[in-house]
Amino acid sequence: MQKQIENNIKKFRYSVEIRLDMGEAARDWNEFVRKVIYNTDVLKDTEFDSIFGDAQQDFMDLQSYFGDEGVGGSIGAIEKLTSQLAADFAEIDEINRTGWSDIYGKDKAQAMEHLV
């Protein structure tokens, strides 16, 4: 049972790492857009670009940490996974304390499998 918990935690960590890597890729793309596209001669002289261009890209960078798949959704992927993990642990704790969970009944194995 302990090995299964360790495997589920590894899967969760890999999922978080993938989402962080995707966020890093989004930030790299934003940097490319900032350097190559927004700094062309046509846009370089516009007041909007000089005032808001970098701020907009920086904001998009920030959203890649918290937004759903880097697009700035209402709850980020990491927050969503963390919340799910906490809820699953709470259900497992409930099974351990009382022998029953409102979601999983007495099926602790199913609750542990859902940790992924």
Image (cartoon, rainbow, N blue to C red):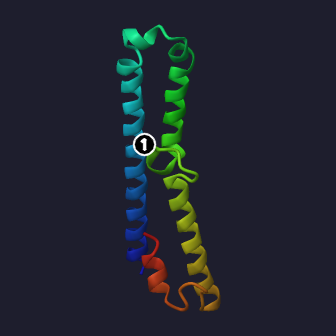
Around disc 1, counting alpha carbons within 10 Å, would you say few (fewer than 14), some (14 to 19), or many (20 or more)? many
In the image, is 15 to the left or to the right of 101? left
Q: Quadrant of the N terminus?
A: bottom left
Q: How many marks?
A: 1
In percent of width and height, residue 51 lies at 57, 16
For disc 1, the marked residue is: 23
In percent of width and height, residue 17 lies at 40, 51
In this picture, is 109 found above or below 24?
below
For the point 40% across and 14% down, which residue is it?
A: 39
The quarter of the displayed image where residue 21 is located: top left
In percent of width and height, residue 16 lies at 43, 54
Q: Quadrant of the C terminus?
A: bottom left
In this picture, is 24 found above or below 48?
below
For the point 46% across and 71% down, which residue is it?
A: 115
Helix, strand or loop at label 1? It is helix
Q: Amino acid at mark 1?
A: Gly
In percent of width and height, residue 97 lies at 64, 86
For the point 38% across and 25% down, which residue is it?
A: 33
